[in-house]
Image (tube, helix red, strand yellow):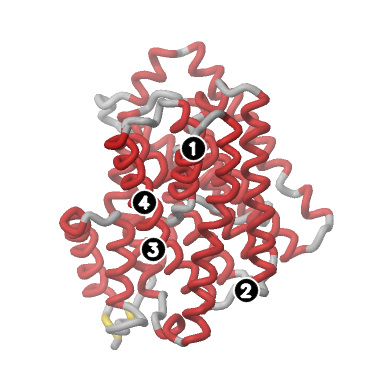
Amino acid sequence: MSINQEFSLLLVSLAVAILPGVSRLLRLPAPVVEILFGVVMGKSLLNLQFSGDWLPFLAHLGFLLLMFHSGMEIDFDMLRKQSWKELLFQLLVFGASLGLSFAAAIHLGRGVFVALVLTTTSLGLVMPILKEMGISRAPFGQKMLIAASLADFLTLFGITFFVLGKDYGFSWRFIAPIPLFAGFALLLWAGRMWVWWHPQQAEKLLGASDSQELGVRLSLALLFLFVAESELVHLEPVLGAFMGGCVLSFVFRQKPDLEIKLSALGFGFLIPIFFINVGMQFDLHNILAVDQLIFTLKLLILAILVKVIPSLLFYFQDFPLRKSLQAGALLSSRLSLIVAAATIGLEKGLIDQQMKDSVVLLALLTCLFGPTLFKLCYHKAADTA
């Protein structure tokens, strides 16, 4: 059933306004409810076809803003305070997860791209859960935040360069991104120096009283600057968006007012449209076949194991086995980055639609399973302590 552009925009806009209230009633993450709304509207059930280019454009813009926010979530102050020994340990945990993901991909009959997809986690879920539990500043919480940050950062770079190699082979194009990374490093250095020498102007730029919203304008300019540079050097635009967010997070360490404004723009309208669009492209019929259900179940089990088993290494950092397993459960949560990776993989022909649908279902299940199990185990341990 085809719907004209005007009505489709009205329907989606109303959904964006109403669904947060629905998510609070159901006690589900808002992105889950938004994807489920898209599932009902899209190929799986009502099969509505929205005409026009506005919704795909807004969904893609929301996708870029989502990755920009993911970059902003990287806490460089926390990473800077870690010793080399701690960082090496965290890299060992990440390496173990990556190795197990490769083994899982081979077992599933898939390649390198699926292994990278399985290595992802969701810092955007891990951070709020730890803050809600009041342990984000505790040593245990800090270790999980570092593990999630490195997983997000390194897997996105791995996916980007794998796609680059797939498109162009191991040729001179691998040095084409050097200007992007050079500009990235230069902006990091110049930005920190400017804030160091002009703290009052930086505070004014980030303050709530900025009537011209210069902080928001700067942030969006930074986003599109890196997206444009990524396009010029044939990298995925999502990497540019992510790096733009990293620059903002590195330069402005304390930016609560700016984060609120950018969240209002992103999570208030554009990012939900991306999740609704993901749900609309999801085809439940691809999952209902017996063979695909078995495959998706295997994918889910392996996706949990590749996070839980490496988390046992936290036991050697003087954390009880129970806490190590709790960390693995929470780090197995996936949502934004894995959906983004699946979208890239489908666009580049690295996975088919059935695989993408399995990954989206995996994201929905793990983002419910991981935080819920972590909270239950944490409260149970606190009650018996």
Task: Name the residue type under label 4.
Answer: Leu
Rendered position, 341 above or below 259: below
Mark 1 and mark 2 residues within 8 Å of each other at the beta carbon: no
Q: Nearer the viewer, mark 4 or mark 2?
A: 4
Q: Earlier in the sequence, mark 3 or mark 4?
A: 3
Residue beneath disc 4: 373
Task: Name the residue type under label 2.
Answer: Gly
Whole-percent x, y for residue 59 in the image? 39, 62
Q: Earlier in the sequence, mark 3 or mark 2?
A: 2
* Mark pair 3, 4: CA separation: 15 Å
Quadrant in the picture for residue 46: bottom left
Q: Going 46% across and 83% down the picture, which residue do you hit?
A: 286
Residue beneath disc 1: 144
Q: Closest to the observer: 321 or 168?
A: 321
* Mark pair 3, 1: CA separation: 21 Å
Q: Going 28% across and 44% down the picture, which residue do you hit?
A: 264
**Side of 289 relative to 184 (left or right):** left
Q: Earlier in the sequence, mark 1 or mark 4?
A: 1
Q: Earlier in the sequence, mark 3 or mark 1?
A: 1
* Mark pair 3, 2: CA separation: 23 Å
Q: Nearer the viewer, mark 3 or mark 4?
A: 4
The quarter of the image holding the N terminus is bottom left
Q: Going 49% across and 67% down the picture, which residue do you hit?
A: 359
Q: How many marks?
A: 4
Looking at this rendering, what residue extends furthest in the front direction? 384
Tag on residue 349? 2
Whole-percent x, y for residue 179 in the image? 70, 41
